[in-house]
Image (spheres, grey):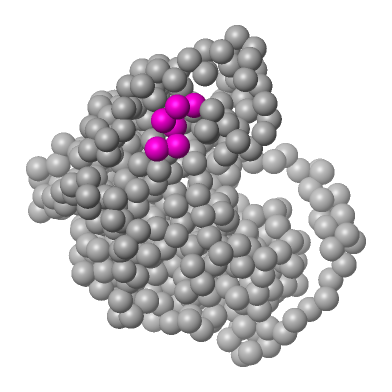
């Protein structure tokens, strides 16, 4: 078992003083160092590990981002030879967990049916390695309905005592013991990096289910419904000298008034925080706790010479109150921050890099997750423009999403975009925003929009 480090209140309060990762862990600053492609284990398996590795190499990829732990869902697979619709097992892992790491953890991983008799994760990693393509272990962390249903006592407990079964609470020692074991087990594989998704206090609206709401939910109400008051969070609050029970009472009172038709302001979250006694202190505690727990995982991986990539979904400001993510604190222990570049115009890339640098620090590497097909690119030129704008805008890497979901000829679009970048041909371009986007959105009107998680990946 990998035990979580214990931190006293004074240690947590000093979290802002954490040093940046040492240079041996840092990703070089050149923009062309990281070209990856997200993929699921079943797609690599059905393609054949050797064939998949050859395809990745021919596309010019430096990495593949292979799902190691993933949430549930349903995927449409246009070019898979065995399946065209695939139901994803919730909360499953796609590597072979070792008793060395999970033997004494309370939470036990759910092994995917495709990994039950074969270490498909190792097979793909080694096949790609032989072709000179590194592997990033794409790891969904705290969003896990399977574990939440199996161990409800470690999930988020809202102000009314309701449990969010899709949301493991990072304040829970058993949750952190599980995640540290997960990271340590993955570090034993010949991988290059671990990309951490949903390492956050999962918010009330995560779109993990078909949401049923008969009333409007304002940003502040959504935040308050996202707060966790489980015993572990109350214990941490006590170490911070915060009266969490008083905060809980004030939040409950505010929400009950809201349910009765009051407190319906649509103003920003920040404007309402000061109106609830103790809420500001409780939110600051969450930022520190999450950063502290992430530091434990990052240190473990850095000790094993693995790089750490943090996936920030929809966050370009330093503080995100519903999730508890402080990008500046997280970046101190990350080799890169990856952001989604979905439904965005290529010319927005430079502004996105500036925003993340402002939030997380000017030295952080910024990666972009992009979709090289529907609905964000209509042809190879669209993928080239996105790639070009990201690299010229200061982005340090690109991950193309997702091998199994897009049409197979999109791999050739990726190859052409990466080829131009590596040849130094990614020159600035001019584009009419109004004209280009109007054609794109007009084309989309004929398609049904997929229900994509939050809208994560």
Q: Looking at the image, which residue is at 44% across and 32% down? A: 279
- Is 229 part of what is drawn in magenta? no
**Residue 76 lies in quadrant:** top right
Residue at the extreme right of the image, as rendered: 435
Task: Give the percent coordinates (x, y) of residue 287.
Answer: 39, 46
Q: Nearer the viewer, residue 28 or 455?
A: 28
Q: Looking at the image, which residue is at 83% across and 76% down? A: 430
Specify whether 67 is left or right of 152: right
Residue at the extreme bottom of the image, as rendered: 423
**Residue 48 lies in quadrant:** bottom left
Q: Nearer the viewer, residue 81 or 53?
A: 53
Specify whether 61 is left or right of 354: left
Specify whether 392 is left or right of 94: right
Residue at the extreme top of the image, as rendered: 260
Q: Looking at the image, which residue is at 68% across and 30% down? A: 266
Task: Give the percent coordinates (x, y) of residue 19.
Answer: 31, 69
Q: Looking at the image, which residue is at 57% across and 56% down? A: 316
Q: Is residue 383 above or below residue 104?
A: below
Q: Nearer the viewer, residue 319 or 94?
A: 319
Task: Give the percent coordinates (x, y) of residue 456.
Answer: 53, 47
Residue range highlighted in magenta:
276-281
Q: Is residue 189 visible?
A: no
**Residue 215 lies in quadrant:** top right
- Is 280 part of what is drawn in magenta? yes
Task: Give the percent coordinates (x, y) of residue 269.
Answer: 58, 36
Q: Nearer the viewer, residue 448 or 390?
A: 390
Q: Is residue 420 visible?
A: yes
């Amino acid at each position: 078992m990998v035990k979580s480090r214990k931190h006293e209140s004074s240690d947590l309060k000093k979290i802002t003083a954490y040093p940046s990762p040492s240079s041996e862990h840092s990703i070089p600053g050149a923009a062309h160092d990281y070209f990856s492609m997200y993929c699921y284990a079943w797609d690599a398996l059905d393609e054949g590990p050797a064939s998949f590795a050859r395809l990745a190499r021919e596309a010019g990829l430096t990495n593949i981002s292979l799902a190691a732990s993933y949430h549930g869902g349903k995927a449409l697979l246009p070019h898979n030879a065995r399946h065209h619709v695939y139901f994803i097992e919730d909360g499953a892992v796609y590597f072979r967990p070792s008793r060395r790491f999970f033997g004494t953890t309370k939470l036990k991983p759910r092994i995917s049916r495709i990994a039950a008799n074969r270490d498909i994760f190792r097979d793909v990693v080694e096949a790609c390695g032989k072709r000179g393509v590194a592997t990033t272990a794409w790891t969904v962390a705290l969003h896990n309905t399977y574990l939440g249903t199996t161990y409800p006592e470690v999930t988020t407990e809202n102000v009314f005592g309701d449990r969010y079964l899709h949301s493991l609470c990072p304040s829970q020692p058993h949750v952190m013991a599980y995640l540290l074991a997960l990271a340590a087990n993955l570090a034993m594989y010949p991988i290059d990096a671990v990309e951490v998704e949903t390492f956050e206090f999962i918010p009330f609206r995560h779109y993990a289910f078909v949401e049923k709401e008969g009333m409007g939910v304002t940003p502040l109400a959504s935040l308050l419904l996202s707060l966790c008051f489980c015993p572990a969070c109350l214990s941490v609050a006590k170490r911070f000298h915060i009266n969490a029970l008083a905060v809980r009472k004030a939040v409950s009172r505010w929400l009950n008034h809201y349910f009765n038709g009051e407190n319906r302001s649509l103003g920003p979250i920040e404007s309402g925080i000061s109106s609830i006694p103790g809420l500001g202190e409780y939110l600051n505690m969450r930022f520190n706790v999450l950063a502290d727990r992430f530091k434990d995982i990052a240190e473990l991986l850095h000790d094993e010479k693995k790089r750490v990539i943090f996936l920030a979904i929809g966050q370009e400001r330093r503080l995100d109150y519903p999730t508890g993510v402080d990008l500046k604190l997280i970046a101190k222990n990350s080799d890169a921050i990856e952001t989604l570049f979905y439904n965005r115009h290529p010319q927005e890339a430079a502004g996105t890099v500036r925003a993340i640098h402002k939030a997380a620090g000017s030295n952080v590497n910024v990666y972009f997750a992009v979709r090289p097909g529907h609905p964000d690119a209509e042809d190879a030129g669209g993928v080239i423009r996105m790639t070009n704008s990201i690299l010229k805008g200061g982005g340090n890497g690109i991950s193309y999403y997702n091998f199994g979901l897009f049409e197979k000829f999109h791999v050739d679009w990726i190859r052409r975009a990466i080829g131009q970048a590596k040849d130094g041909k990614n020159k600035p371009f001019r584009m009419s925003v109004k004209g280009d986007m109007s054609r794109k959105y007009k084309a989309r009107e004929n398609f049904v929009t997929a229900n994509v998680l939050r809208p994560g990946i």
